[in-house]
Image (cartoon, coloured by chain):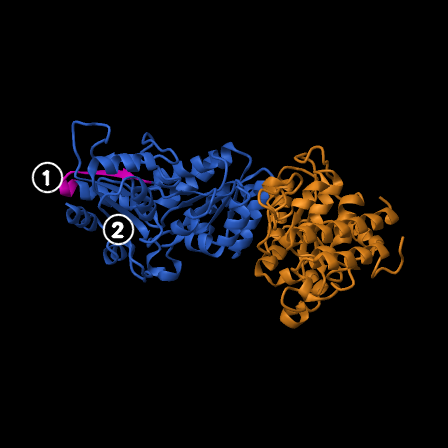
Amino acid sequence: MDTIQLAEQCRTMRTDIVTMLNRAGSGHPGGSLSSVELIACLYFGGVLKYDPHDPEWAERDRFILSKGHAAPVIYSALARAGYYSTDELSHLRRLDAMLQGHPHAARIPGFECSAGSLGQGLSVSNGLALAFRARGMSSRVYCLMGDGELQEGQVWEAVMTASQHGLDNVCAMVDFNHVQLDDTVENIKSLGDLARKFADFGWHAIEIDGHDIAAVMSAYKAAAACKGRPSVIIADTIKGKGVSFMEGDPAWHGTAPNDEQLAQALADIRSGYGFKEVQ
Amino acid sequence: MSDLKMIPMRDGYGNALLKLCASNERVMVLDADVAKSTRTDWIKEKYPDRFIDMGISEQDMVGTASGMALGGMIPFCSTYGVFLAGRAWDQIRTTVCYNKLNVKLAGAHAGLSVGKDGATHQALEDVAIMRTLPNMTVIVPCDAVETEKATLAAAAMEGPCFIRFGREAVPVITDEKTPFRIGRARLVTGYDPEDMKHDSDCVVFANGPLVHEAVLAAASLAAEDIHITVYDLHTVKPLDCTTVIAAAEKAGRVVTAEEHQKAGGMGSAVAECLAEHCPVPMRIIGVDDTFGESGTPDELYDRYGLRAVNIEAAVKNLL
């Protein structure tokens, strides 16, 4: 997809996210909406190697969702990629549903590793990268983390592991949306100069506007081109991006919109709220 | 028992890893900065490409192993049982077990065997917190030979597996021919419940180094014309309920013995099974709701009542 098509795909995914959460009556809109561009570019911008008709294709790249509560954004992406019907989105969080509140990989074609307890995905990504190296495979691993999630100590253990082993087949993405459940990240446990922290640990750090599709695409290219060390894309984003009443508000970390709020959200997404240009 | 060879159980783990690395290119060995203690330094020396020292990062070690398993490898995570099961419990629960990953967890220096290091390093709760996890297999072998067999069997099965073993040299009471199957209790001494010609006054289920103590108790009790049947209940999960129930029905009395807290360990697993299917009078031998302390393992086994005499007393108490 080109930039204009990707922007349209982002609108579709935002629509999926708020709609599925409204139907489910619970869930996490904020951190899904903030990472839409990162995930849309990964799946539909030609970055990730995958085949929805062969989810277990051995040569595929892997996407590891570390911030498990951002399930809706990846549920939408996998449905739109053709792994399963978009009808599944209507059953989110219901008994017997394929799409659990936090993802259960065994139930979801195309989803690699269950997540929900924060801080674990980067370690898993490193393990995959080490396995690919040991088996002489060229597959890459992409790992989406939240900024609040970086308060988990295990993340920094994994940061050291990736640089210790020079895992240039690992690309971490930090959805730096500045808000966690209770308050802003700044007010709770600030991350300070995050790019510098990663760089000091030996990583190739790329800082971008996480809602700028062209910037996201070139960040993925720069990450893939970097050899000898792991890359991190630190994506400056807005929690609840694209929905006027959700943007930047911790209250929308884990609350589903009611019918009235959904109507407003859908209108905001249609009109391109928060974006400079409306394609 | 001077005629028995004394070998540390961890040597069995190291020997099994050497065999696995020689025969299976998918096996990877991870450690958390205690490679000399767990014997994974044998792999580091002989198969450096198969070994990764993850540093003092148990949670990252288990997470990395999970990724390796997703990538088609068979990773073995090795460190002290107390840190592996305790510190990385959430990683084991949510990433390893929920995803049913082919990750093998080796808890070394389990029980009181680490002795003088004291309570912080003595794993006395690991079996309890591992066996509550869905999809997990939990094995407590009795000597170095059985530890080797358990490690090879863990590699051959698909899915998460926790094996715990001690630090000190303990008597070798099995040999190459002794049968070992995950999930199957092994009759050590006494009367087979299927053999109706004889009777047994009590059945003792033991695992780890307590199997040897149970054998000593059996000999000592026999001199007093008290006859017990001893099983090595090495697999705590999945529990061999068929054998446990049959033996309990036959003997009518049950004693369990393990180097672990009484709460939640093998004795609890047996009690859960028998309470539902064959309630009989029972005694559980283990560490009774207390932390350990510094001392030699021998002193500690005496202090916490993990000896043959304690098994004998429990049997007599039931008669």
Label 2 and label 1 in one chain? yes
Instruction: Residue at the far bottom: name it.
Output: A187
The stretch of residues the image draws in magenta is: B219-233
Q: Give A265 or A171, whichever is nearer the viewer.
A: A265
Question: What residue is disc 2 on?
Answer: B285
Q: Earlier in the sequence, mark 2 or mark 1?
A: 1
Residue furthest front in the image: A260
Tell which subunit mark 1 falls on.
B
Q: Is residue B220 magenta?
A: yes
Horizontally, residue B194 falls left or right of residue B97, namely: left
Q: Which shade of the palette goes to chain B?
A: blue
Per the model, the C-alpha gap separating discs 2 and 1 is 22 Å
Q: Position of residue A141 (x, y in %)?
A: 68, 46
Magenta stretch containing residue A97, yes or no?
A: no
Q: Residue at x 46, y 39 (%)?
A: B17
Q: Quadrant of the N terminus of chain A?
A: top right
